[in-house]
Image (spheres, rainbow, N blue to C red):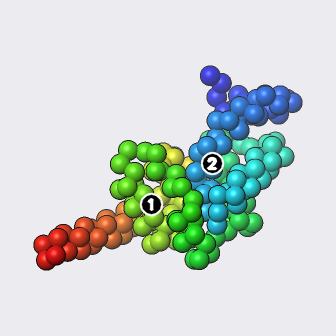
Amino acid sequence: MPTDEQLVSEALRGSAPAFERLVERYQVRLLRFLITRCASRADAEDAMQDTFVNAYRYLGSYNPRWQFSTWLYRIAIRNAARDYGRNATADADVADSAPDPLEECIDAAERENLWLTAKRLLSDDVYAALWMRYAEDMPVKEVARALGRPQSWTRVALLRARRRLTLELGKDDATQSEGKAYG
């Protein structure tokens, strides 16, 4: 299986099938990520399409020193923030209407609660860092690069996000336990 860099190189030499393979490789993951940053699934799909169009247009500016996925997510973040950003009321609509991208994973109810809680508590950048690190399994260095932040900021943001979620989810468990004990 060719690497991303090999496919980019072929695409730069005019191979449309090479770029199509890159799109196929990243479209599902990128859409899951954009759903968390856009007001609706339709906006996420539009942002994904714009991301791939821009990636193709600016493919010559890709630096193979970095992972292709980092470069692609950086374009996606800029597109979503600029054209398809969400607001507080849209967040509630997305949680109610769009399927949670982790719903199909093991123990969907707990995972959904975790990501919905994270979406509610964390800023967009911190949520994106958490998503890229744990849902997309990107290294901290690549997450930092995609967000345009220092690695130190990324590490601290991830640590604080994990602590905040642990506290918040712990409160929910304690509240539920107390309810059972007194109910």
Which residue in the rendered view is the most extreme toward the front? 183
- How far, Cα to Cα, is label 2 from label 1? 16 Å
Q: Quadrant of the C terminus?
A: bottom left
Q: Is residue 1 left or right of residue 47?
A: left
Where is mark 2, residue-wise?
30
Residue at the image position 70 percent from the left and 60 percent from the top: 43
- Up/down of 82 relative to 50, above or below: below
- Up/down of 132 relative to 117, above or below: above
- Up/down of 15 relative to 174, above or below: above
Where is mark 1, residue-wise?
115
Residue at the image position 62 percent from the left and 22 percent from the top: 1
Place of residue 118 in the rendered image (x, y in percent of width and height, measured from the top left): 44, 65
Residue at the image position 47 percent from the left and 58 percent from the top: 130
The one nearer the camera, 63 or 71, is 71
Residue at the image position 60 percent from the left and 57 percent from the top: 35
Q: Is residue 27 left or right of residue 52?
A: left
The one nearer the camera, 43 or 159, is 43
Label 2 sits on what residue type? Leu
Label 1 sits on what residue type? Trp
Which residue in the rendered view is the most extreme toward the right? 14
